[in-house]
Amino acid sequence: MSSALLQSTDEVNDARAAVFWALGDPTRLRVFQTLAEADGPLNVTAICERVDCEPNLVSHHLGCLRNCQLVDSEREGRKKFYEVSRPEAIEMVALADECLRQNVESVLGCEIVREEE
């Protein structure tokens, strides 16, 4: 993984915020993690079974992840199969986990974050 940051511009910062927003919804993050941990592409039914959500909600979240180019889809017959398209995004979630190891309680207790929810 490259440690070089892109030059901070309004456009780059907006794009960064969009990626974090896309992964910021707990259900969407579970969908993403399910795909990241899968042995291969999954269809909506398989994802629903693993994240315990309705198909329309999973499809909505997959649409967001696909629009942000974090997942790809491929149609096989009447079904679409999804997989992570950006391995770097998996690494980003892993880095977030590393950051949380020392301060998960502080993050969960952040009043500012709670106010914005």
Image (tube, grey):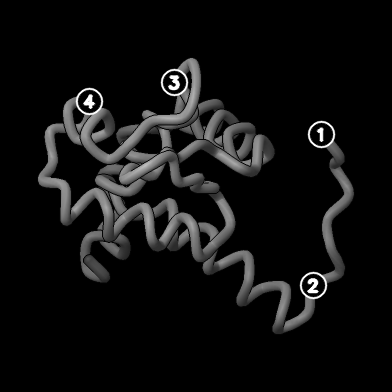
**Residue behind mark 4:** 50
- Whichever of callouts 1 and 3 sits on the residue coming sooner in the sequence is 1
Residue at the spot of label 2: 8
Gap in angstroms between the C-alphas marked 4 and 1:
29 Å
Q: Is there any visible trace of residue 102 in the rendered image?
A: no
- Amino acid type of the residue tagged 3 in the rendering: Ala
Q: Is residue 60 shown above or below 14?
A: above
Cβ atoms at labels 2 and 1 below 8 Å apart? no
Q: Identify residue type, mark 2.
A: Ser
- At label 1, the amino acid type is Met
- Tell me the quarter of the image containing the C terminus: bottom left
Q: Is residue 28 visible?
A: yes
Find disc 1 in the rendering and name its residue: 1
Q: Residues within 10 Å of mark 1 (few under 14, many from 20)?
A: few
Q: Secondary structure at mark 2?
A: loop
Q: Amino acid at mark 4?
A: Arg
Residue annotated with mark 3: 38
Residue 108 in the image: state x and y as whole percent: 28, 43
Q: Mark 4: which secondary structure?
A: helix
**Residue found at x 22% / y 60%:** 114
Q: CA distance from mark 1 to mark 3?
A: 21 Å
